């Protein structure tokens, strides 16, 4: 596949568990999206969310790393499957101004989908797809 083409599966729709407390979680639909035009990021949208719930942009490398070892600092952390939280579940912790959310994400479909994004845009080649002049222009406009 040409790296400038979209992945075979540019989106992954999943039902995840949104943790509400020590003993409570609710199922929530999410969509993960990957666009080679923004090759370092994965977009996370909540199905049916109002416009007040903006998408989250996660590091593709961080998600892949989080399948094996805890990754991230600050607003996004990814923790791999483990015996205490479930051998088939990746935990994604999102922290924002309004609070934090913990998502339990099925590991197998996430792993397979991420592999497809790396097949489309191999690690280390992302910089060749970024339009640096546009990035610099946008930064200078807001800087």
Image: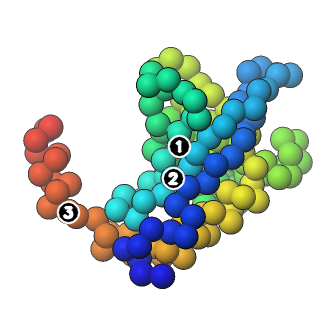
3D distance between C-alphas at marks 2 and 1: 7 Å
Q: Which residue is at the front of the view, 25 or 86?
A: 25
Q: Is residue 74 above or below residue 133?
A: above
The first of marks 2 and 3 along the sequence is: 2
Q: Residue furthest right?
A: 83
Report if residue 103 is visible in the image: no
Dot 1 surroundings within 10 Å: few (below 14), some, or many (20 or more)? Answer: some
Q: Position of residue 46 (x, y in %)?
A: 57, 35
Give the quadrant of the C terminus: top left
Element class at badge 3 = helix
Figure quadrant of residue 28: top right
Element class at badge 1 = strand
Which residue corresponds to mark 3?
Answer: 132
Q: Is residue 26 above or below residue 106?
A: above
Which residue corresponds to mark 1?
Answer: 44
Closest to the camera, between mark 1 and mark 3, is 1
3D distance between C-alphas at marks 1 and 3: 24 Å
User: Marks 2 and 1: CB-CB under 8 Å?
Assistant: yes
Q: Is residue 25 above or below residue 109?
A: above
Q: How many marks?
A: 3
Closest to the camera, between mark 2 and mark 3, is 2
Q: Which residue is at the front of the view, 138 or 9?
A: 9
Which residue corresponds to mark 2?
Answer: 33
The first of marks 2 and 1 along the sequence is: 2
3D distance between C-alphas at marks 2 and 3: 22 Å
Query: Going 75% across and 54% down the picture, which residue do you hit?
Result: 107
């Amino acid at each position: 596949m040409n790296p400038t083409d979209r992945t075979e599966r540019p989106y992954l729709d999943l039902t995840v568990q949104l943790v509400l407390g020590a003993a409570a979680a609710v199922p929530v639909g999410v969509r993960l999206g990957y666009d080679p035009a923004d090759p370092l990021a994965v977009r996370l949208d909540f199905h049916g969310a109002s416009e007040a719930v903006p998408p989250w942009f996660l590091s593709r490398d961080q998600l892949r790393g989080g399948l094996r070892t805890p990754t991230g600092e600050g607003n996004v952390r990814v923790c791999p499957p483990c015996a205490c939280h479930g051998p088939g579940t990746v935990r994604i912790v999102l922290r924002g101004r309004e609070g934090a959310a913990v998502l339990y994400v099925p590991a197998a479909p996430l792993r397979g989908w991420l592999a497809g994004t790396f097949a489309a845009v191999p690690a280390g080649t992302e910089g060749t797809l970024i339009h640096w002049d546009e990035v610099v222009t946008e930064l200078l406009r807001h800087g």
